[in-house]
Image: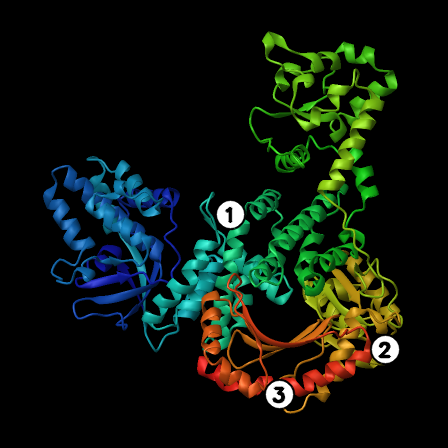
């Protein structure tokens, strides 16, 4: 690595050099604000007659394999924003000179700074070589054809900005200012220096690089150039296109990767640690699983596109629900919904079930808003919700999982909604929430959709906020007081009107019958559902308010339903805040969640020491000072059974689980982290003595796996609560799966990579050898291409048995013992040929 201080013009006018912006670099993102600051510095260094102005560093790889016979290519690692902007400024100066009879200046600028004058190959002519849409825009401003480009481009915007400022008076001032810019050039040698480490180091010093910039660099930077372009075009470019808010024109790639990692790890990365988390997971970038992971990230990004741009969803019913979720900004549900949409694409659930899930998400979140429960609990709920889905009973298991939540995570009941809805101020709330409420109330079961967001329709107070004397005369003092102080902004007193300004604070009778100039402003003429009850009554008093509220409440329950599923306590314990949980005596944990990190651990003692270590890292001084809660010293001999938590500090480990719970609750209170520790006890036989379906499945797998001979597929697979167990088949995206249900058992080969095209191709190649495979297996198999779904599968099954009848287990075992080894052997060689 070499570093030199240099004038920028000497760098740019080097002959036969091309500055290459590689595909892994972030987009050109400078706006006119940054350009204005740079131009201000350029002009001031000349006007103040300073000798120089430092603009930072430019890092590049020289003498790389990008070099051609005609030019030496410098691959820009850092500094492309400044370098591109200065080139755009030179183009603006060139165009000004050309258009104002300064031919000598124009020729100098063009041949010195913008092109390699004596190079023959057209591809090597431009000094600045870009590899994306910026290249098209840059060539357009150079040729003067930028008006023919319709897409938004920072290159063109910044060119127009510079071109609008350059005048006869400041032309030479700007040019001379450019001559006084200096920078540090840092040149790296390929094979000797590590560009990725240097890039990270530059970022750590405070340069404004997003998490997605760093991830893109990590994926692409150390690949050979040809492979870089291939991976960029086939993987990264689709991710960038999908994870983008098309309305706001903003990139959401960092947010998407964060949601993907949350789904994968059941742990929410800090927004500033997404890159670090991503990098830690994928150290071996040559591994086939890593390549499959990139394909999977790309695949799920197509679902994410629908979340952030609902208009891209083709199905109108799904699109409508996604629009509601997007408007309510239920972003915390995205990690969960990524896998739900993937399940729909793989045929695990139908579109109707998907719509049910989307409606249930809204019911859960909207009911919590009405009751006033904290939104920060939603992160933890949706982070782990998918792990509680039983694909045999998809929607019901989701509903049951949500109904089991307690405390601040609960699903509000109908009675809780009735009490809260009656008194809640729904007028002075965020417009997105108010509009959502009225749109769904008004349009429920309507054949003709009413656009409640129209500027012609506004929220109207039946009893006005500034009531006239007539209102005071028509109501009893008690009613007038209740309306004015309690109910004026509640749903029972609010309606929609196209004539709010006309109705104003008039009496109810006037509001109902108003028909000035034949314009039918009154409630009596309204076609809105919210006004139908008002058309039937003659006065607006507390009795009328109560009756109208009851009508709206009943409609509310039909829209935002409370799930009608039976929740059996023995099937699954609920996830609870430690402050709400039962004592841990004779209980084991299924998992715990501390600060959005889910840890699958059954022993309370392990949770205890995990949390203590985390608290020590957060504020060791606060923990050590809390001696009245937790004795902590540097002397192990101070304890019967001392255990080190960090840096030579010991605590007592020989205490019972109840005491551990008590200590943790006191410490969490001191640290003001009462909402940060959630636990879930194991269910079924461990805690209640009553085996539920999860524990029955686990018990079945536990007794089956040791019986499997002639195959090592499941030797290292742990029994789970799921109705399926999968093992790799030797190629990414293909797996052997055993399935147990209440009606059948099945062995299948699942072809379910993230690429539908790859899955269908692999299925067809296997299908070509169907006779050979079935002969090796010994009987016909069921071949399911599933053309409408992403996945395909090949299976054999036995019907007429029931997992929950232990008398059937002998038959089930025999099916797996006899068929699994044959099934594996029949496909083994065929799968190897697919690789």
Mark 1 vs mark 3, CA separation in Å: 47 Å
User: Which of disc 3 and disc 2 is earlier in sequence?
Assistant: 2
Cα separation between marks 2 and 3: 48 Å
Disc 3 designates what residue? Answer: 821
Q: Residue at x 69, y 51 (%)?
A: 376
Give how far across and how far down residue 114 sits, in percent: 20, 53
Q: Which mark is residue 309?
A: 1
* Residue 542 image offset from top left, x and y in percent: 84, 23
Whichever of callouts 1 and 2 sits on the residue coming sooner in the sequence is: 1
Residue projecting furthest to the top? 517
Q: Residue at x 63, y 60 (%)?
A: 349
Mark closer to the observer (1, 3):
3
Residue at x-position 72% and y-position 48%? 364
Q: Is residue 629 visible?
A: no
Label of residue 654 in the image? 2
- For the N terminus, the quadrant is bottom left
Callout 2–callout 3 Cβ contact below 8 Å? no
For the point 72% across and 70% down, which residue is it? 613
């Amino acid at each position: 690595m070499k570093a030199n201080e240099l004038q920028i013009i000497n760098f740019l006018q080097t002959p036969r050099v091309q500055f290459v912006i590689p595909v892994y670099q972030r987009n050109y993102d400078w706006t006119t604000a940054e350009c204005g600051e740079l131009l201000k510095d350029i002009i001031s260094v000349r006007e103040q007659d300073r000798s120089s102005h430092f603009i930072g560093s430019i890092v590049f790889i020289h003498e790389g394999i990008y070099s051609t016979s005609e030019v030496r290519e410098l691959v820009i690692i850092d500094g492309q924003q400044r370098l591109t902007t200065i080139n755009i400024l030179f183009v603006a100066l060139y165009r000004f000179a050309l258009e104002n009879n300064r031919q000598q200046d124009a020729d100098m600028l063009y041949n010195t700074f913008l092109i390699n004058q004596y190079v023959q190959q057209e591809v090597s002519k431009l000094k600045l070589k870009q590899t994306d849409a910026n290249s098209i825009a840059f060539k357009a401003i150079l040729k003067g054809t930028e008006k023919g480009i319709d897409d938004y481009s920072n290159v063109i915007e910044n060119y127009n900005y510079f071109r609008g400022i350059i005048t006869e008076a400041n032309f030479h001032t700007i040019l001379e200012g450019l001559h006084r810019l200096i920078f540090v050039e840092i040149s790296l040698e390929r094979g000797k220096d590590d560009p990725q480490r240097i890039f990270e180091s530059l970022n750590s010093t405070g340069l404004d690089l997003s998490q997605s910039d760093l991830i893109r660099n990590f994926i692409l930077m150390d690949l050979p150039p040809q492979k870089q372009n291939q991976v960029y075009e086939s993987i990264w470019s689709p991710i960038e296109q999908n994870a983008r808010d098309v309305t706001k024109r903003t990139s959401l790639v960092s947010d998407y990767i964060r949601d993907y990692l949350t789904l994968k790890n059941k742990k929410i990365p800090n927004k500033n640690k997404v890159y670090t988390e991503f990098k830690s997971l994928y150290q071996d970038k040559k591994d086939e699983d890593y390549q499959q992971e990139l394909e999977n990230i790309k695949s799920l990004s197509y679902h994410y596109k629908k979340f952030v741009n609902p208009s891209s969803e083709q199905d109108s019913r799904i699109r409508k629900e996604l629009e509601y979720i997007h408007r309510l900004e239920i972003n915390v549900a995205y990690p969960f919904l990524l896998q739900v949409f993937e399940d729909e694409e793989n045929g695990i659930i139908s579109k109707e079930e998907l719509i049910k899930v989307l409606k249930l998400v809204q019911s859960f979140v909207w009911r919590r808003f009405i009751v006033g429960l904290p939104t920060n609990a939603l992160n933890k709920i949706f982070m782990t919700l998918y792990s509680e889905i039983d694909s045999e009973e998809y929607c019901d298991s989701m509903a049951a999982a949500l109904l089991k939540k307690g405390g601040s995570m609960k699903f509000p009941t109908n009675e809780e909604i009735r009490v809260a809805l009656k008194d809640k101020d729904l007028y002075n709330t965020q417009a997105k929430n108010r509009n959502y409420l009225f749109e769904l109330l008004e349009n429920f079961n309507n054949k003709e959709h009413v656009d409640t967001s129209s500027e012609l329709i506004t929220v109207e107070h039946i009893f006005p906020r500034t009531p006239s004397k007539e209102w005071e005369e028509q109501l009893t003092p008690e009613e007038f007081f209740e309306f004015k102080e309690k109910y004026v902004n509640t749903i029972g007193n609010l309606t929609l009107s196209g004539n709010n300004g006309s109705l104003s604070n008039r009496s109810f009778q006037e509001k109902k019958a108003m028909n000035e100039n034949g314009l039918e402003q009154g409630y009596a003429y309204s076609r809105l559902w919210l006004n139908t009850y008002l058309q039937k009554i003659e006065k607006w008093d507390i009795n009328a308010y109560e009756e109208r509220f009851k009508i709206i409440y009943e409609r509310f329950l039909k829209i935002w339903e409370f799930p009608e599923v039976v929740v059996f306590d023995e099937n699954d314990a609920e996830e609870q805040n430690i402050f709400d949980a039962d004592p841990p005596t004779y209980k084991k944990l299924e998992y715990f969640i501390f600060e959005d990190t889910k840890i699958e651990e059954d022993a309370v003692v392990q949770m205890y020491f995990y949390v203590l270590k985390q608290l020590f890292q957060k504020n060791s001084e606060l923990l050590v000072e809390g001696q009245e809660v937790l004795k902590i010293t540097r002397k192990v001999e101070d304890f019967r059974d001392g255990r080190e938590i960090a840096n030579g500090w010991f605590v007592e480990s020989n205490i019972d689980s109840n005491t551990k719970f008590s200590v943790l609750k006191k410490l969490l209170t001191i640290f003001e982290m009462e909402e940060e520790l959630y636990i879930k006890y194991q269910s079924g036989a461990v805690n209640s003595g009553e085996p539920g379906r999860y524990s029955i499945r686990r018990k079945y797998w536990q007794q089956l796996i040791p019986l499997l001979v002639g195959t090592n597929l499941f030797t290292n697979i742990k029994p789970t609560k799921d109705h399926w167990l999968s093992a790799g088949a030797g190629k990414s995206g293909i797996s052997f799966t055993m399935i147990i249900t209440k009606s059948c058992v099945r062995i299948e080969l699942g072809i379910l990579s993230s690429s539908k095209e790859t899955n269908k191709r692999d299925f067809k190649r296997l299908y070509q050898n169907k006779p050979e495979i079935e002969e090796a297996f010994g009987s016909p198999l069921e071949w399911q291409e599933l053309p409408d779904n992403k996945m395909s599968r090949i299976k054999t099954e036995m019907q007429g048995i029931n997992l929950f009848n232990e008398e059937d287990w002998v038959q089930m075992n025999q099916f797996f013992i006899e068929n699994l080894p044959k099934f594996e052997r029949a496909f083994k060689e065929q799968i190897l040929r697919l690789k």
